[in-house]
Image: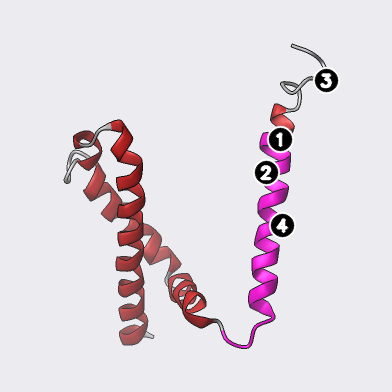
Amino acid sequence: MRPFGPEAFGSVTRYVTSTMVSFGVLALVATWYANRNRTGPVGTFFTVIGRTALSCYVLQNLLASIVFYDWGFGLSRRLSEENLNWVTVIVWALLSLILFGFAWLCLRFFG
């Protein structure tokens, strides 16, 4: 291992640079939303989810456990390795829509 080679900066790149970039992107998104008059459909989606964040978090873990673990549908065991990534993303998107509907209904009826 060279003292100044690419291997020496792996930890810096992984833990420092990526953290700075993620906080920068977060700051840009927050600034963009703070300077708008209306949030639009994407902002409405995240506002509804944000107001019911703890309930959505618990429900997401419960539903994903039912879908992927063996005590539920056991989907992770039934799929091949190359298909598991795509199916995980699709299930995540469907669960996000379900959680949005749940959050919207909760806020509509329970304010």
Q: Is residue 51 left or right of residue 96?
A: right
> Disc 4 to disc 2, how far (Cα)?
10 Å
Give the labeled residue for mark 1. 13
In this picture, which residue range is highlighted in magenta? 14-38
- What's the residue type where badge 4 is placed? Gly
- Residue at 63% x, 76% y: name it: 33
Q: Earlier in the sequence, mark 3 or mark 4?
A: 3
Image disc number at residue 18 = 2
On screen, residue 37 versus residue 56, left or right, reads right
Q: Which residue is mark 3?
A: 4
Residue density around tag 1, few if under 14, some if 14–19, many if 20 or more, within 10 Å = few
Real-space CA distance between mark 1 and mark 2, rounded to the nearest whole angstrom: 6 Å
**Local SS, label 4:** helix
Which residue is denoted by mark 4 in the rendering?
A: 24
Examine the residues drawn in magenta and state their main secondary structure.
Answer: helix
Q: Type of residue at label 2?
A: Ser
Tag 1–tag 2 contact (CB < 8 Å): yes
Callout 4 environment at 10 Å: few (<14), some (14 to 19), or many (20+)?
few
| Distance (Cα) linking label 3 and label 1 | 13 Å
Residue at position x 17%, y 45% from top? Answer: 72
Residues marked 4 and 1 touching at CB (< 8 Å): no
CA gap, disc 2 and disc 3: 20 Å
